[in-house]
Image (cartoon, rainbow, N blue to C red):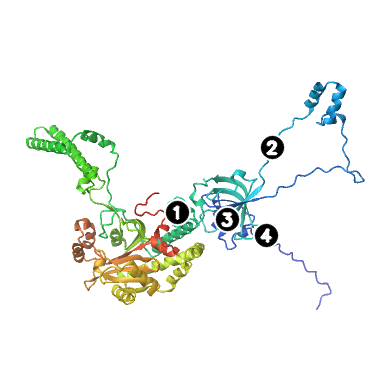
């Protein structure tokens, strides 16, 4: 039954007030009070969402220009008007008139006074002395700076008013370091900059000498920049290359860490000649022009004494030592005689070596003893660390090393310098096929890492250096690497070289031209060539069952050539010692290496990866010196 009472009015539900939208902000870098430019400029909106944010930025001026502002017209005091609209003049008293420098009133005073001088003195005393006009101030202006802090490709547009910075410092020349505080805003004129900074406070200005600063000149070629390695990193090209190099470094450690490898640091100074090469840097204490303090006495004593006289004295003292040893009557005299003989022998050795240096004759290792070499045996800067890695692979399973390797090669080559960084890998219980797969996976991982983490830098590379660079990296990922034997490579080259008149013989290492043809023209992708003739590879590579080839491989990339080389190492001690004898490798220097075969031998394989060449491949540059921070080549080590 329906109720007679009226239904209650509905209670109004209050409309919820929307929460204020979150304002975008950017935090300063953890170890500085400045904001890194990439956190602003590499946002999806180009930094526009940060407009109105106040922050501190720092960087180096890439370009600058100055625009003059129109000076405002001086304001005139309006004259008072009457109700009729006519300008009303202010009444002037007689005293004010007399204190004005009007010639008419001066003349009147002369007439009434009868004497002009005292009255003139009294009047001029009350007249304000005229001051010379101040020098004109420079017209107001605005400097527009593009600065880069090295964190990204893009630069930030900074607007600096002349009222903010001393006019003498505007506009700052290229290379000037600035640290400014200001507010982000949208630029008034449309251009490539989505966001800019209105500077409100100048915190630091690091000036440059425009006349002597090499980067003041526009568009210097990369070859010219090699003579100024300290400033080369400030160029946009080298900026991008070093960010890509840094990303590849991180990719290297990430790949091997994720796949269960351990990082081992191998020695840079070694007594092992792993490659059997004569192009090694020898480590010893060379003679210096200035004699050490401890040798000053010896030098003074030998100044007026001939080498023959010193040797004759050494023979006499040696006879005295022998006589004292036979009698055993005076031990103190024997000790003194031994010390005297040692000093004389050192003096004779020093004089003999000095004469050889003057004549230009080479010194043997034994003849350098007087220089007190740090090591008693021949030592070198390492050419390869793979032999040392085998020690740890036989204990840890799978290891890798990342560091510099040295080769004293005087050949001028765009793919080789004296100091190059290598990634070296050694895997226990691994055969040739396994390590080839590891090398191929590492190459693909590196290419993908660059595409995923260096997008802006790769866009710059494609625009300024090599337009095909991104496509080349993507092709490595999309196509499998071609694997062919050395014999198949020779056959393919023989067919192709009929029209090119390029001679090739089996049993020798393939030249750079051969490898370039296979990767760039024939297959157009990475090529892995394996089972080389034993003459073409080092002594430690495992001999195949045919007795003619060894289990070694090279990986060749388009435009770069040979990127890495690898092999399965010889684990059979009899085969290894036989190969060492054939190649003339001294076993006494490799006793520790042979011990690995005597005690707990294991099948193992590895490779050496040219890290600098990988950077060269990614960036599209043609000379490896452009991708190394401080390249060292023949007769070039200035910085």
Q: Quadrant of residue 445?
A: bottom left
Q: Quadrant of the N terminus?
A: bottom right
Real-space Cα separation, disc 2 to disc 4, in angstroms: 54 Å
Q: Which mark is residue 20?
A: 4
Labels 4, 1: front one: 1
Question: Could you say where residue 146 lies in the image, as x and y percent from the top left?
Answer: 57, 54
Earlier residue among tags 3 and 1: 3
Q: Relative to 84, is 348 on the left or the right? A: left
Q: Is residue 43 above or below residue 504?
A: above
> Circle 1 sits in a helix, a strand or a loop, which is it?
helix
For label 2, the residue is: 134
Earlier residue among tags 2 and 1: 2
For label 1, the residue is: 225
Is there CB contact under 8 Å for labels 2 and 3?
no
For label 3, the residue is: 156
Earlier residue among tags 4 and 1: 4
Real-space Cα separation, disc 2 to disc 3, in angstroms: 38 Å
């Amino acid at each position: 039954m329906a109720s007679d009472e009226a239904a209650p009015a509905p209670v109004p539900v209050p409309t919820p007030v929307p929460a204020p939208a979150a304002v975008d902000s950017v935090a300063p870098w953890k170890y500085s009070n400045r904001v890194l430019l990439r956190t602003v400029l590499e946002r999806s909106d180009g930094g526009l969402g940060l407009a109105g944010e106040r922050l501190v930025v720092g960087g180096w001026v890439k370009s600058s220009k100055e625009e003059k502002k129109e000076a405002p017209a001086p304001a005139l005091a309006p004259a008072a008007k009457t109700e009729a609209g006519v300008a009303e003049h202010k009444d002037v008293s007689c005293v004010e008139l007399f204190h004005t420098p009007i010639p008419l009133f001066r003349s009147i005073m002369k007439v009434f006074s009868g004497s002009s001088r005292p009255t003139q003195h009294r009047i001029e005393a009350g007249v304000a002395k005229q001051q010379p006009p101040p020098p004109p101030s420079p017209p107001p202006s605005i400097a527009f700076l593009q600065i880069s802090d090295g964190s990204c490709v893009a630069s930030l547009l900074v607007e600096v008013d002349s009222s903010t910075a001393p006019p003498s410092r505007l506009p700052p020349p290229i290379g000037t370091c600035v640290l400014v505080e200001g507010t982000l805003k949208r630029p008034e004129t449309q251009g490539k900059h989505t966001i800019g900074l209105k500077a409100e406070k100048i915190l630091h200005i690091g000036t440059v000498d425009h006349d002597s600063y090499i980067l003041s000149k526009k568009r210097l070629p990369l070859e010219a920049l090699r003579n100024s390695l300290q400033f080369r990193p400030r160029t946009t090209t080298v900026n991008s290359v070093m960010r890509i190099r840094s990303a590849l470094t991180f990719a290297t450690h990430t790949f091997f860490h994720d796949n269960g490898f351990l990082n081992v640091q191998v020695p840079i100074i070694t007594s092992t000649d792993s490659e059997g090469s004569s192009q090694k840097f020898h480590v010893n204490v060379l003679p210096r022009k200035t004699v050490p303090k401890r040798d000053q006495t010896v030098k003074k004593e030998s100044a007026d004494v001939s080498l023959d006289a010193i040797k004759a004295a050494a023979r006499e003292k040696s006879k005295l030592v022998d006589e004292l040893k036979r009698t055993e009557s005076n031990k103190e005299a024997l000790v003194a005689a031994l010390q005297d003989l040692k000093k004389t022998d050192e003096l004779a050795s020093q004089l003999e070596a000095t004469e050889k240096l003057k004549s230009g004759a080479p010194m043997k290792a034994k003849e350098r003893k007087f220089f007190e070499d740090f090591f008693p045996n021949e030592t070198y800067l390492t050419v390869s660390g793979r032999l040392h890695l085998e020690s740890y692979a036989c204990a840890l399973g799978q290891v890798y090393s990342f560091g510099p390797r040295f080769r004293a090669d005087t050949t001028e080559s765009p793919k080789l310098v004296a100091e190059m960084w290598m990634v070296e890998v050694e895997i226990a219980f691994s055969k040739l096929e396994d390590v080839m797969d590891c090398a191929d996976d590492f190459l693909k991982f590196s290419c993908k890492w660059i595409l995923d983490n260096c997008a802006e830098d790769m866009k710059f590379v494609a625009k300024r250096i090599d337009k095909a660079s991104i496509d080349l990296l993507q092709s490595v990922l999309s196509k499998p690497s071609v694997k062919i034997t050395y014999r198949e490579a020779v056959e393919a080259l023989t067919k192709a070289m009929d029209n090119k008149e390029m001679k090739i013989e089996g049993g020798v290492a393939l030249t750079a031209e051969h490898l370039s043809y296979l990767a760039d023209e024939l297959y157009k992708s990475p090529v892995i060539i394996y089972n080389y003739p034993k003459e073409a590879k080092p002594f430690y590579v495992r001999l195949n069952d045919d007795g003619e080839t060894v289990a070694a491989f090279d990986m060749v990339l388009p435009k770069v050539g040979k990127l890495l080389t690898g092999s399965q190492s010889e684990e059979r001690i009899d085969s290894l010692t036989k190969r060492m004898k054939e190649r003339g490798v001294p076993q006494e220097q490799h006793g520790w290496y042979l011990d690995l075969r005597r005690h707990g031998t294991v099948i193992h394989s590895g490779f050496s990866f040219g890290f600098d060449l990988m950077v060269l491949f990614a960036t599209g540059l043609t000379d490896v010196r452009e991708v190394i921070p401080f390249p060292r080549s023949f007769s070039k080590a200035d910085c």
